[in-house]
Image: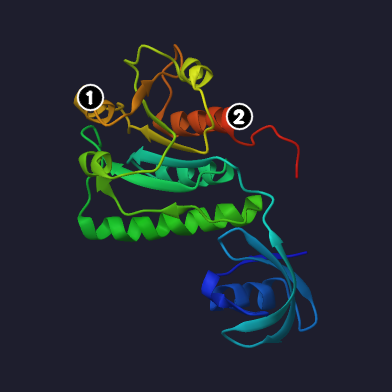
Amino acid sequence: MSRFHVRPEAVEADRVVFDEQETRHLARVLRLAPGDCVQVVDGRGTEFTVRLESIGGRTAAGTILARSSSATESLLAITLAQGIPKGDKMEWIVRTVTELGVTRVVPLMTERAIVRPEPGRWRDRARRWQRVAKEAAKQCGRGVIPSVEALRSIEEFAETRWEADVRLCLWEGARRGLSEILDATRGPVASALLVVGPEGGLARREVETLEARGFTSAGLGPRILRTETAGPVAVSLLQARFGDLGAARR
């Protein structure tokens, strides 16, 4: 059954309205017609079986036949705060960690960031990264689209009151490895906050700022990983330890 993402406000009572982009896909690409059934997710973890009733040039609508909670979301809510890398690496990172189940991505401007475009361009990039997250969520069957927030400085990020049971920052100068830290963690862990630097990693001053606010610095082993590798690896370790990576399909 074909799968579509809609905004939460597109679902009202037993009716779903598709936007222009999804309408074009279902009508012109998949050539669906009234009477066909599709699967719809609202981006907040609810899935619907919908029978198409009308398909116009810009919108389509359907009737909800059944609804259920998404079985593809991890019990562990992970926020990845990623130092901005150069080129299109951020798109790759967003796509990969979406597949791995992160809840939120926060782009960070850090001391060692190579790319520093004008503020107006960051808004365009954030919108692009959000579209990448949506496409990745659709591809991997997720019921929730991770949010990609606006760019912020690492100081602003550190001052924000984040709800997290585990707070970690990856740093090559850390005394303990991530696996050791996770093994020593006690009590239930339902949320995690992870900070990853750009090319060149986090500066010592930035690590000290984060540690002063409850973060633990962690290493990823004897080899130096690229920034686009480090985040997904750490997310995978968190999901394997506290989340659903490696679990049987529900």
Q: Residue at x 56, y 61 (%)?
A: 43
Query: Which of the image's four quarters has the N terminus?
Result: bottom right
**Residue wearing tag 2:** 240
Q: Residue at x 65, y 83 (%)?
A: 61
Q: Is residue 121 left or right of residue 28?
A: left
Asked whether disc 1 touches disc 2, contact meaning CB atoms under 8 Å apart, the reply is no
Say which quarter of the image contains residue 162: top left
Q: Residue at x 61, y 76 (%)?
A: 24
Q: Where does the image place residue 74, in percent across and percent down from the top left?
A: 60, 43
**Residue wearing tag 1:** 208
Q: Where does the image place residue 69, in percent across and percent down from the top left?
A: 68, 58
Say which quarter of the image contains residue 129: bottom left
Q: Is residue 206 left or right of residue 85?
A: left
Check the image and report above or below for 59 versus 148. below
Q: Where does the image place residue 195, in percent across and percent down from the top left?
A: 36, 34
Q: Nearer the viewer, residue 25 or 184?
A: 184
Check the image and report above or below for 110 versus 18. above
Query: Which of the image's four quarters has the C terminus?
Result: top right
Q: Secondary structure at mark 2?
A: helix
Q: Which mark is first along the chain, 2 or 1?
A: 1
Q: Is residue 67 left or right of residue 207?
A: right
Question: Looking at numbered disc 2 in the image, what kind of residue is underneath it?
Answer: Ala
Q: Secondary structure at mark 1?
A: helix
Q: Residue at x 76, y 81 (%)?
A: 33
